[in-house]
Image (cartoon, coloured by chain):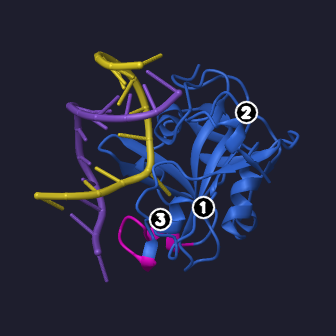
Chain colours: A blue, B purple, C yellow
Amino acid sequence: MAKHGSELTPPTGDVLDAAFFDRETTTVARELLGKVLVRRFDGGALWGRLVEVEAYLGPEDLAAHSKGGRRTPRTEVMFGPPGHAYVYFTYGMHWCLNFVTREAGVPQAVLVRALEPGPGVGRCAGPGLVTRALHIDRALNGAPLQPPDLYMVDDGAPRRRIFATPRVGVQGTGRWEKRLLRYVVDSPFLSRPVRRKRLRAL
DNA sequence: ACCGCGATGCCCT
DNA sequence: GGGCATCGCGGTA
């Protein structure tokens, strides 16, 4: 009996590989919706289905940590190859999980903002909650998105209608704060409700 | 429903 | 030292 995590088996299917992440970041972000994030540790497994993500398009994107090509110890993994985890710490208490996209040298990423939690998984309606529920922290920064520790699975679930909104918590970045780079599917597990009227279908 | 605010620590053109 | 890709709470409505 494992100490932590569920005893149940996570969904199986194709594991998303580096080629999946080595594409337009907005495309990757949209296609990630409905796929399953799996976290294994201590012999247990935790997982959830992605329902909310955001694209960060540095260096142009003034809301991205990699804006202006900023290359620092924190942003370093975003300059690396696609299909790796970028995990950063914010507000003194929260970790945020991103997936690095595009080829090495192009510092872009997709932020995981909300999941529909699998069995035994706590609330995942927000980036800080996702990492807390799945036990994700600095130890996974730079990790490849491959079994066993952390990976994405396409279990063949049907695609759902995708909507786009401005990104959460992005201000003072001119046109970037208006761009529709947050992608969601209709779900009760979003980090914040989306007004039907403002939804823009893709 | 929206709004303000405190917690808390790392980052840094 | 100021800001931060957040969260949960408590107030007002």
Mark 1 to mark 2 CA distance (whole Å): 35 Å
Please state which of the two labelled residues, at mark 1 or mark 2, is closer to the viewer. 1
**Magenta segment, which residues?**
A68-80
The one nearer the camera, A9 or A75, is A75
Residue type highlighted by circle 1: Arg
Q: Which residue is mark 3?
A: A64
Density class for disc 2 (Cα within 10 Å; few <14, some 14-19, many ≥20) is: many
Residue type highlighted by circle 3: Ala
Q: Which residue is mark 2?
A: A10
Mark 3 to mark 2 CA distance (whole Å): 32 Å
Q: Is residue A72 visible?
A: yes
Density class for disc 1 (Cα within 10 Å; few <14, some 14-19, many ≥20) is: few
Q: Is residue A113 left or right of residue A62?
A: right
Please state which of the two labelled residues, at mark 3 or mark 2, is closer to the viewer. 3
Give the letter of the chain under mark 2.
Answer: A
- Is label 1 in a helix, a strand or a loop? loop
Give the letter of the chain under mark 3.
Answer: A
